[in-house]
């Protein structure tokens, strides 16, 4: 549809595509309307993305560490955040499995191993800002300290649930990102602050 | 001195078993424009560090790691390499942090770590470098006569300290650390107590006392003396002292010194510095040559950092690591002889502070120094030698740091021709036994004459002459034990390595005047493959 004459220039400004043309040709108007439509889609996606991201903070899934991760991402490493969280989820899976094995037999629980696993999980979750997972780890450690197998099992279950939940949420977020990029838009560089979004709940401090 | 300093390109080694953190930290550090190396295992990290001793500026390590406790890694790095280490942990418990500090961590970060914290880690590197120089300067100001400007000049690399990254860290790893322990805080102008100025005479009394005590502990003395083959003369003189030091207590030394106004504390503090000096001399052999003088150093704190350095107390009860450093403490007061500037066998030489067991035959040297057979002139050497060094104290400060380099070389070279059965080495190696193979049998104790046969400059010759002296009464007779056991020597692989043919005549282009200004005992050999007479003779012996 676009004639050579009309394809003067196309720019992406603020995540929206704009078409500039010298001529008064009706086509440019038409093209701009097309682009405008696209822009609208992009704009919508971008808004959606932003809102979703903020909600993850508001619901306590993520904290400021996740914000830091996003800030670290740059053009050179556009998949940085996705790679890091992927490493985290793999780690979760491994640790949960080994702790599960240790807790398996009631008469022979290796609490030291479990404690070590919890510690690692806590460290790992703090690296990506997986706030809920980290919180469960705190309770989990307490159960370990008193050698409460039942408590440990419950925590284990909870930690498993939380990490999988977060995994799903983040996958949705990354999908939104992809759609935006595919629609020609740019990912909003919005960095929510956990502390601002959840003033009612103090950030979780380590023991 | 901090011109040219820039945090850009800071070489960081990150150690963390958590792959997520490792990736994040790598990214963060790269954003700080640092050069990052990551490592998931502590042992691997140590291997990397040891492989390239000057390859990193700072280490960041997690506290909890599966293969090695982070604190252990911290100890190793601090002792062996003296790099600043930052600990990290999710756990911010007071006692954990305290443990980190006690083990020598220069900082402790809590995870999650923020960019702003990483952006300024370079301060630890700069601080360490500045402290090094400041401490040396401070020591100098401290007024110890036996510390010369040359050390500082040398430390500063003979061209001003360049603290930019990538440059070799300096040699004074220990001193730097230990100097911080200096009770009188030399770098501070507001020192509360009146400082004792350890003049040459006073120090000599001190050394005499130490050596005297050392006589009573020949078992150790022998070992050290033999091991410290590559020691410059002062070390040779004091080498036995090192061992003796282990046994010598400040009280005893004080008593022997018989200086009424001196306190036990003064002696204790000086003893610490002396130990450090000796150790540094040993280390200095591998690193560079020092122009001379003794540094005012303190012993490490009794903390855990150094506990691992001590071998089983019964064995090598001297301050520094079992294996490597000791060999350098060639003791023998008898070795005043400049020619006996023997070098360490490569095996021992390459380590600085190591946790390896010390070179085996502890009794190897017992016989080495059977001074009883040594005529007085020999015994008097240490004293005089030391004396001569001080006599030369004045001219010394103008020394170029590189004199030391050439000096031993010169001596070596000179000695070689006539030293197949050199007197000098002999004197020093004087075994009492028949066992002793070597050299010593046909000792011609006319050192001066032997020396004069060498083509040395007048000045040098005079130094050498001065070395054969009137030994003041001392104690040195006690130094040498019998039973020279050359099997050790022969077994040492360095023998295989060195071989006579390895002795190349050094091309010493140093001016004789340089040589003459530097007392023999302050010469340091610096070539790892330079083997001195000791070795030479060892070869002949076998």
Image: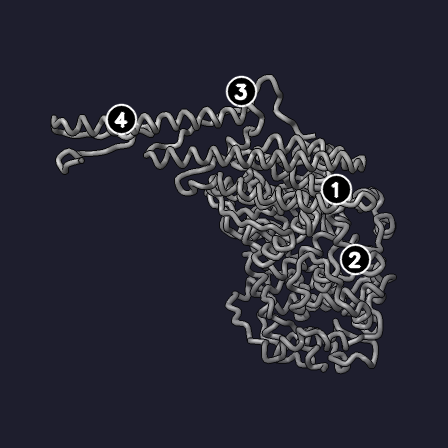
Q: Name above or below for residue B406 compared with residue A174.
A: below
Q: Nearer the viewer, mark 2 or mark 4?
A: 4
Q: Secondary structure at mark 2?
A: loop
Q: Is residue B128 left or right of residue B449?
A: left
Residue under label 2: B311
Does label 1 or label 2 sit earlier along the sequence? Answer: 1
Callout 2: 10 Å neighbours few (<14), some, many (20+)? many
Q: Nearer the viewer, mark 1 or mark 2?
A: 2
The residues tagged by marks 1 and 2 sit, at their Cα atoms, a distance apart of 32 Å
Query: Is residue B143 something that shows in the picture?
Result: no
Residue under label 4: A36
Callout count: 4
* Host chain of mark 1: B
For image coordinates 83% across by 78% down, the residue present is: B433
Q: Looking at the picture, tell me which residue is in the foreground, B98 or B456.
A: B98
* Host chain of mark 2: B
Residue under label 1: B196
Q: Secondary structure at mark 3?
A: helix
* Host chain of mark 3: A
Q: Secondary structure at mark 1?
A: loop
Q: Is residue A96 left or right of residue B359?
A: left
Q: Nearer the viewer, mark 4 or mark 3?
A: 4
Callout 1: 10 Å neighbours few (<14), some, many (20+)? some
Query: Is residue A22 something that shows in the picture?
Result: yes
The residues tagged by marks 2 and 4 sit, at their Cα atoms, a distance apart of 79 Å
């Amino acid at each position: 549809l676009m004639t050579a004459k009309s394809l003067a220039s196309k720019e992406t400004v603020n995540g929206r595509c704009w078409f500039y043309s010298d001529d008064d040709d009706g086509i440019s108007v038409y093209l701009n309307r097309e682009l405008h439509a696209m822009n609208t889609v992009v704009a919508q996606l971008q808004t959606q993305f932003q809102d979703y991201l903020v909600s993850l903070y508001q619901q306590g899934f993520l904290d400021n560490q996740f914000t830091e991760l996003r800030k670290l991402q740059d053009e050179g490493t556009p998949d940085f955040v996705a790679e890091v969280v992927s490493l985290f989820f793999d780690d979760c899976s491994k640790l949960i499995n080994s702790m599960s094995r240790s807790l398996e037999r009631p008469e022979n629980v290796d609490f030291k191993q479990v404690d070590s696993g919890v510690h690692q999980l806590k460290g790992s979750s703090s690296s990506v800002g997986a706030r809920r997972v980290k919180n469960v780890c705190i309770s989990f450690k307490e159960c370990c300290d008193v050698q409460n197998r039942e408590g440990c099992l419950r925590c284990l279950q909870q930690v498993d649930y939380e990490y999988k939940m977060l995994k799903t949420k983040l996958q949705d977020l990354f999908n939104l990102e992809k759609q935006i990029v595919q629609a020609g838009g740019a990912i909003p560089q919005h960095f929510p602050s956990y502390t601002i979004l959840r003033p009612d709940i103090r950030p979780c401090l380590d023991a | 001195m901090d011109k040219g300093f820039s945090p850009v390109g800071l070489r960081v080694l990150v150690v963390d078993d958590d792959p997520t953190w490792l990736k994040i930290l790598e990214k963060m550090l790269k954003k700080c424009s640092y050069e990052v190396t990551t490592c998931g295992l502590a042992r691997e990290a140590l291997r990397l560090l040891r492989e390239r001793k000057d390859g990193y500026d700072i280490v960041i390590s997690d506290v909890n790691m599966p293969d090695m406790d982070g604190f252990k890694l911290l100890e190793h790095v601090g002792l062996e390499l003296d790099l600043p280490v930052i600990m990290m942990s999710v756990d911010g418990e007071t006692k954990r942090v305290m443990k980190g500090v006690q083990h020598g961590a220069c900082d402790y970060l809590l995870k999650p770590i923020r960019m702003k914290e990483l952006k300024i880690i370079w301060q630890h590197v700069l601080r360490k470098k500045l402290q090094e120089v400041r401490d040396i300067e401070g020591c100098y100001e401290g007024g110890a006569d036996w510390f010369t400007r040359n050390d500082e000049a040398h430390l500063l690399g003979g061209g001003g300290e360049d603290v930019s990254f990538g440059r070799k860290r300096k040699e004074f790893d220990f001193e730097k650390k230990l100097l911080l322990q200096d009770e009188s805080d030399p770098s501070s102008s507001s020192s509360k107590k009146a400082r004792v100025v350890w003049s040459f005479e006073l120090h000599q009394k001190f050394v005499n006392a130490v050596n005297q005590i050392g006589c009573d502990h020949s078992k150790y003395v022998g070992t050290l003396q033999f091991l410290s083959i590559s020691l410059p003369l002062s070390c040779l003189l004091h080498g036995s002292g090192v061992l003796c030091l282990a046994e010598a207590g400040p009280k005893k030394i004080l008593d022997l010194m018989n200086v009424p106004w001196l306190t036990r504390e003064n002696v204790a503090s000086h003893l610490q510095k002396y130990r450090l000096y000796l150790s540094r001399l040993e280390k200095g052999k591998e690193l560079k040559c020092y122009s001379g003088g003794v540094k005012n150093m303190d012993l490490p704190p009794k903390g855990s950092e150094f506990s691992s350095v001590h071998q089983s107390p019964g064995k090598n009860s001297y301050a520094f690591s079992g294996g490597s450093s000791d060999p350098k403490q060639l003791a023998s007061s008898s070795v005043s002889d400049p020619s006996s500037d023997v070098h360490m066998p490569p095996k021992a030489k390459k380590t600085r502070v190591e946790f390896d067991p010390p070179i085996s035959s502890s009794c190897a040297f017992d016989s080495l120094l059977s001074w009883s057979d040594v005529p007085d002139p020999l015994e008097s050497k240490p004293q005089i030698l030391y004396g001569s060094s001080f006599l030369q104290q004045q001219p010394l400060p103008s020394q170029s740091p590189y004199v030391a380099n050439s000096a031993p070389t010169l001596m070596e070279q000179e000695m070689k021709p006539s030293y197949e059965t050199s007197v000098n080495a002999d004197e020093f190696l004087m075994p009492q036994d028949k066992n002793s193979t070597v050299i010593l049998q046909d000792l011609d104790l006319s050192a001066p004459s032997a020396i004069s046969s060498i083509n040395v400059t007048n000045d040098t010759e005079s130094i050498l002459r001065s070395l054969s002296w009137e030994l003041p009464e001392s104690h040195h007779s006690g130094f040498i034990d019998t039973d020279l056991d050359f099997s050790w020597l022969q077994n040492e692989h360095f023998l295989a390595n060195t071989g006579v043919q390895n002795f190349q005549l050094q091309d010493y282009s140093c001016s004789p005047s340089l040589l003459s200004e530097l007392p023999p005992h302050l010469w340091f050999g610096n070539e790892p493959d330079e083997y001195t007479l000791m070795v030479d003779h060892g070869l002949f012996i076998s």
